Amino acid sequence: MKTINRGRRKSAYVFAILAGASVSAISFEGLAQASPASASFFSDSSWTSYDASYSHNAVVDLSKTAPGSLQRGVQWETKEFNAVPLSRQPLGTRAFGGSVNAAVTMTQNLGNGVGVSVWGRSVYAASSSGYIYSVNAINGKMQWHTRTLNVDMSNPLVANGTVYAGTGNVAFNFPALMTFTNSQPTVRGGGYGGVYAMDAATGRIEWFHPLSGDQMPTPALSNGSLYFANGNGYFYDLNASTGVTNWKLYLGGFDSMSSTTLWTNPSNGQSYAIVGTTDPNLLNAINLTTHQLAWTLAIPGITLTGMGDETPAYSQTSGMLIEAESVRLENSATSPTANVGVYGINPATGAIVWQDSLGRGPLPAAYRGAVAMTHNGVAYVSDTATSTLFAINTKTGQEMWSSKIPNALPAGAGRGAPTYADGVIWISTSQSIDAFNATTGAVLASHNMGGRFGIVNPVIAGGTMYVDNSYDWIMAIPLTKILPSLKINNP
């Protein structure tokens, strides 16, 4: 696969013109972010995986150079190019047969399907409208935007002054759909897919690696490599500096949105990439030294795209992988129902150590599982069928508490990973940011943000929360605006 490299910047523009699309980087404020790391607001030197870490707890410490306003909490709302008023009903509610389907369509084609990333002095977001954005973390002013060839639904990675983002959509062409319905290996992703590398300060494209399938899964960045599975059935190792393929492995099943989790065996130092695929519905562990499969895991009763949608979380405390899946679809007298299961998996062998059934409820729309987050040996994960948040012991699978999510919309709530900060579980649900007591599960607050959240994880830095949504907005809000009684721990 040829990689378009930038040094010779014209080549990417030529490719885009031939493809019938445009690729552009437009900067604002005189490129005031020319060296963001030199006076960074955030202490983390890079953002190298989905949800910031393999535990999926997206908390970022403030640096010594961060202004006090970030500790107190800043507030702004930034419109992206196709922003819809936050107070209105989803676009096309009648055309798509109701607000649920219309809202899902907006997530997949217009707004932000997953959460933001922060680095330097900026917030980075990927929009399904086909743009990557950089905005100022203090005031939300847009610094640059880069046009891509397709939908952007991955969590942008940022390291060494470069932003990495995938492009590609949820579509199947007709032949691919026929093979999918016959449970044969197929390719997910209509139009162009691929991975971009962009200058973090200006948005200028450094290289683009085209791929035949969708690239909605977020790669993992480690030791100069980008590791990811794709909608075309392959797992890739790309050189992060050049975009050239180091090696690839055919998995057979396609990856929809299962982002890469890296795990290193403490007994021998061997590293593995763990990703999910569909048709066959498997969790796959790839040995990063031998470039071969170490193990695969099949879970009976997975519905729809299942494993290919789910990103496993890792608990450092218990050494367990945590996977949440929609399983055992049934048709009741009135409507389909589903059961959400949570699994504790040994990352060395792929064996299921424990499993929990969270309960049966109405079939969630589109993305049916939920992304788990782990903190101090506890997994926090939602049952999207019943719109309930659970706290589960990652070593034993014992349920510690459960709490109904307030103000849930019919599509189900809590798809994105929660965030733990200051003794509180923060989670984006439907239109709201909800706060739960991390020890008891008691609902502390529910703050309506408007619009709708997709698979969005709140990012917390000091006293500020950063989120984006399906209505094509990027937002910052003080934690105390959501929960006025909160006492924020100073760094």
Image: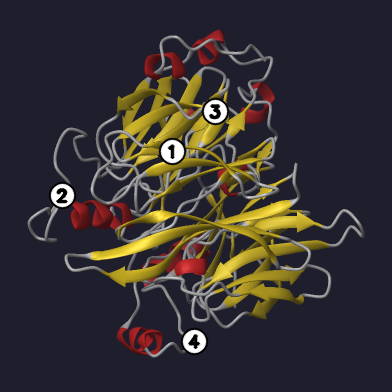
Q: In terms of sequence position, does the residue under pointer 4 or pointer 1 come before the other?
A: 1
Mark 3, residues whose alpha carbon is within 10 Å: few (<14), some, or many (≥20)? some
Which label sits in the foreground, 2 or 3? 3
Q: Mark 1 highlights which residue?
A: 144
- Report whether 213 appears left or right of 488: left
> In the image shown, does 259 or 204 lie closer to the viewer?
259
Q: In the figure, 475 relative to 161: above or below?
A: above
Real-space Cα distance between discs 4 and 3?
42 Å
Which label sits in the foreground, 4 or 3? 3
Determine which quarter of the picture holds residue 102.
bottom left
> In the image shown, does 409 or 233 lie closer to the viewer?
409
Determine which quarter of the picture holds residue 467.
top left
Q: Mark 4 highlights which residue?
A: 185
Q: Mark 2 highlights which residue?
A: 91
Task: Please tell me which residue is depicted at 49% across the width and 64% down the height of the picture.
Answer: 215
Q: In terms of sequence position, does the residue under pointer 2 or pointer 1 come before the other?
A: 2
Real-space Cα distance between discs 4 and 1?
39 Å
Q: In terms of sequence position, does the residue under pointer 2 or pointer 4 come before the other?
A: 2
Residue 387 image position (x, y, % from top left): 35, 45
Residue most toward the right?
Answer: 268
Disc 1 and disc 3 in contact, CB within 8 angstroms: no
Q: Mark 3 highlights which residue?
A: 438
Q: In terms of sequence position, does the residue under pointer 4 or pointer 3 come before the other?
A: 4
Q: Secondary structure at mark 1?
A: strand
Q: In terms of sequence position, does the residue under pointer 2 or pointer 3 come before the other?
A: 2
Disc 4 and disc 1 in contact, CB within 8 angstroms: no
Q: Secondary structure at mark 2?
A: loop
Q: Identity of the amino acid at label 2?
A: Leu
Can the viewer see residue 182? yes
Disc 2 and disc 1 in contact, CB within 8 angstroms: no
Residue 170 image position (x, y, % from top left): 37, 67
